[in-house]
Amino acid sequence: MDLKSLIRDIPDFPEPGIIFRDITPLLRDPQGLRYTIDALTEQSAAFTPDCVVGIESRGFMFGVPIAQQLGVGFIPVRKSGKLPAEVHSIEYELEYGKGLLEIHKDALCQGDRVLILDDLLATGGTAKATADMVEKTGAQVAACVFVIELLALEGRKKFNHHTPVVSLIQY
Protein backbone atom coordinates (compact mmCIF):
# COMPACT_ATOMS: atom_id res chain seq x y z
CA MET A 1 0.00 0.00 0.00
CA ASP A 2 1.24 3.50 -0.83
CA LEU A 3 1.05 5.10 2.62
CA LYS A 4 2.69 8.31 1.42
CA SER A 5 -0.42 8.98 -0.65
CA LEU A 6 -2.33 9.18 2.68
CA ILE A 7 0.03 11.73 4.23
CA ARG A 8 -0.85 15.36 3.53
CA ASP A 9 1.89 17.99 3.29
CA ILE A 10 1.03 21.29 4.99
CA PRO A 11 3.58 23.95 4.01
CA ASP A 12 4.68 26.63 6.48
CA PHE A 13 3.21 24.93 9.56
CA PRO A 14 3.85 25.54 12.41
CA GLU A 15 6.45 28.00 11.09
CA PRO A 16 7.44 29.34 7.69
CA GLY A 17 9.74 26.94 5.86
CA ILE A 18 8.47 23.81 7.66
CA ILE A 19 6.51 21.11 5.82
CA PHE A 20 4.18 19.43 8.30
CA ARG A 21 3.44 15.76 7.51
CA ASP A 22 -0.24 15.43 8.44
CA ILE A 23 -1.48 11.91 9.24
CA THR A 24 -5.15 12.94 9.41
CA PRO A 25 -5.97 11.48 5.96
CA LEU A 26 -4.27 8.22 7.00
CA LEU A 27 -6.35 8.05 10.17
CA ARG A 28 -9.51 8.69 8.10
CA ASP A 29 -8.80 5.89 5.62
CA PRO A 30 -9.93 2.50 7.07
CA GLN A 31 -7.72 0.39 4.80
CA GLY A 32 -4.69 2.65 5.29
CA LEU A 33 -5.16 2.71 9.04
CA ARG A 34 -5.55 -1.08 9.24
CA TYR A 35 -2.49 -1.58 7.02
CA THR A 36 -0.43 0.82 9.16
CA ILE A 37 -1.40 -0.84 12.45
CA ASP A 38 -0.79 -4.32 11.02
CA ALA A 39 2.59 -3.32 9.55
CA LEU A 40 3.70 -1.65 12.79
CA THR A 41 2.52 -4.69 14.78
CA GLU A 42 4.44 -7.06 12.50
CA GLN A 43 7.61 -4.96 12.82
CA SER A 44 7.17 -4.66 16.59
CA ALA A 45 6.55 -8.35 17.31
CA ALA A 46 10.14 -9.19 16.39
CA PHE A 47 11.36 -7.21 19.43
CA THR A 48 9.23 -9.26 21.90
CA PRO A 49 8.18 -6.30 24.06
CA ASP A 50 6.55 -6.66 27.45
CA CYS A 51 4.67 -3.39 26.88
CA VAL A 52 4.19 -0.52 24.46
CA VAL A 53 4.96 3.05 25.53
CA GLY A 54 3.09 5.60 23.42
CA ILE A 55 4.10 9.25 23.30
CA GLU A 56 1.34 11.88 23.63
CA SER A 57 -0.77 12.16 21.67
CA ARG A 58 -0.50 10.48 18.30
CA GLY A 59 1.54 7.67 19.79
CA PHE A 60 -1.61 6.76 21.73
CA MET A 61 -3.63 6.29 18.51
CA PHE A 62 -1.25 3.67 17.18
CA GLY A 63 0.13 2.33 20.45
CA VAL A 64 -3.08 1.01 22.00
CA PRO A 65 -4.17 -1.20 19.06
CA ILE A 66 -0.61 -2.45 18.59
CA ALA A 67 -0.31 -3.33 22.28
CA GLN A 68 -3.64 -5.13 22.04
CA GLN A 69 -2.55 -7.12 18.97
CA LEU A 70 0.75 -8.01 20.66
CA GLY A 71 -1.05 -9.08 23.84
CA VAL A 72 0.87 -6.62 26.03
CA GLY A 73 -0.01 -3.55 28.08
CA PHE A 74 0.12 0.10 27.07
CA ILE A 75 1.83 2.90 29.02
CA PRO A 76 1.25 6.58 28.16
CA VAL A 77 4.02 9.17 28.21
CA ARG A 78 2.35 12.53 28.77
CA LYS A 79 3.12 16.20 28.74
CA SER A 80 3.74 17.80 32.12
CA GLY A 81 0.92 17.84 34.67
CA LYS A 82 -1.33 15.23 33.03
CA LEU A 83 -0.52 12.15 35.13
CA PRO A 84 -2.04 11.82 38.62
CA ALA A 85 0.54 9.66 40.46
CA GLU A 86 4.28 10.11 41.13
CA VAL A 87 6.22 10.64 37.91
CA HIS A 88 9.64 10.66 36.36
CA SER A 89 10.06 13.88 34.34
CA ILE A 90 12.53 14.88 31.69
CA GLU A 91 13.06 18.11 29.79
CA TYR A 92 13.95 17.77 26.14
CA GLU A 93 14.67 19.86 23.07
CA LEU A 94 11.98 20.33 20.45
CA GLU A 95 12.50 21.65 16.95
CA TYR A 96 10.83 24.86 18.16
CA GLY A 97 11.80 25.08 21.86
CA LYS A 98 11.74 22.85 24.93
CA GLY A 99 9.23 20.40 26.35
CA LEU A 100 8.67 18.31 29.47
CA LEU A 101 7.49 14.70 29.41
CA GLU A 102 6.41 12.44 32.26
CA ILE A 103 5.79 8.77 32.97
CA HIS A 104 4.40 7.22 36.14
CA LYS A 105 7.24 5.95 38.34
CA ASP A 106 5.46 2.61 38.82
CA ALA A 107 4.42 2.17 35.16
CA LEU A 108 7.24 -0.22 34.30
CA CYS A 109 9.15 -2.94 36.10
CA GLN A 110 12.86 -3.64 36.30
CA GLY A 111 13.87 -5.50 33.15
CA ASP A 112 10.68 -4.88 31.16
CA ARG A 113 11.32 -4.81 27.41
CA VAL A 114 9.65 -1.67 26.12
CA LEU A 115 8.61 -0.72 22.62
CA ILE A 116 8.46 3.08 22.22
CA LEU A 117 5.95 4.13 19.60
CA ASP A 118 5.07 7.47 18.00
CA ASP A 119 3.78 8.75 14.68
CA LEU A 120 6.89 10.73 13.68
CA LEU A 121 10.64 10.69 14.19
CA ALA A 122 12.06 14.12 13.39
CA THR A 123 15.01 15.39 15.46
CA GLY A 124 14.57 12.52 17.93
CA GLY A 125 14.30 14.72 21.03
CA THR A 126 10.91 13.45 22.19
CA ALA A 127 11.69 9.79 21.56
CA LYS A 128 15.13 10.02 23.17
CA ALA A 129 13.65 11.72 26.23
CA THR A 130 11.10 8.91 26.43
CA ALA A 131 13.85 6.29 26.15
CA ASP A 132 15.79 8.00 28.95
CA MET A 133 12.69 7.96 31.19
CA VAL A 134 12.04 4.29 30.40
CA GLU A 135 15.58 3.50 31.49
CA LYS A 136 15.08 5.54 34.70
CA THR A 137 12.37 3.04 35.68
CA GLY A 138 14.78 0.12 35.28
CA ALA A 139 13.15 -1.08 32.08
CA GLN A 140 15.02 -1.43 28.80
CA VAL A 141 14.17 -0.07 25.36
CA ALA A 142 13.64 -3.00 22.99
CA ALA A 143 13.04 -0.74 19.96
CA CYS A 144 11.60 2.56 18.79
CA VAL A 145 8.94 2.35 16.08
CA PHE A 146 7.45 5.19 14.03
CA VAL A 147 5.00 5.62 11.20
CA ILE A 148 7.06 8.42 9.57
CA GLU A 149 10.75 9.33 9.72
CA LEU A 150 12.21 12.61 8.44
CA LEU A 151 15.65 11.35 7.38
CA ALA A 152 17.28 14.77 6.91
CA LEU A 153 16.78 15.58 10.61
CA GLU A 154 18.79 12.46 11.61
CA GLY A 155 16.69 11.66 14.69
CA ARG A 156 17.83 8.04 14.82
CA LYS A 157 21.36 9.24 15.61
CA LYS A 158 20.11 10.23 19.09
CA PHE A 159 19.92 6.53 20.01
CA ASN A 160 22.85 4.25 20.68
CA HIS A 161 23.63 1.69 18.00
CA HIS A 162 22.03 -1.07 20.11
CA THR A 163 18.55 0.48 19.92
CA PRO A 164 16.67 -0.62 16.80
CA VAL A 165 14.76 2.21 15.11
CA VAL A 166 12.03 1.26 12.61
CA SER A 167 9.86 3.51 10.43
CA LEU A 168 7.27 2.62 7.80
CA ILE A 169 7.61 5.80 5.71
CA GLN A 170 10.70 7.90 5.13
CA TYR A 171 10.96 11.41 3.74
Image: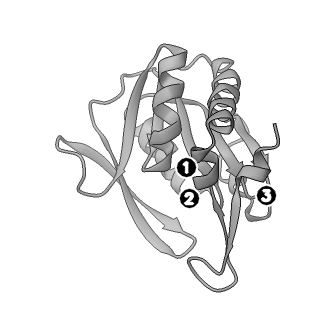
The CA span between labels 2 and 1 is 6 Å
Q: Which residue is mark 1?
A: 127
Say what secondary structure mark 2 lies in: helix
Q: Nearer the viewer, residue 94 or 45?
A: 45
Mark 2 / mark 3, whichever is N-terminal: 2
Disc 3 target residue:
151
Q: Residue at x 69, y 61 (%)?
A: 8
Q: Are marks 1 and 3 in contact (CB under 8 Å)?
A: no
Give the class, few, some or many, for how many residues have Cα within 10 Å of label 3's Cα (few <14, many ≥20). some
Q: Is residue 113 visible?
A: no
132 to 151, vertically: above or below: above
Give the image quarter of residue 37. Answer: top right
From the image, tell me which residue sits under label 2.
125
Label 3 is placed on what type of residue? Leu
Residue 96 at x, y percent in the picture: 53, 76
Q: Alpha carbon of mark 2 to alpha carbon of mark 3: how far?
A: 14 Å
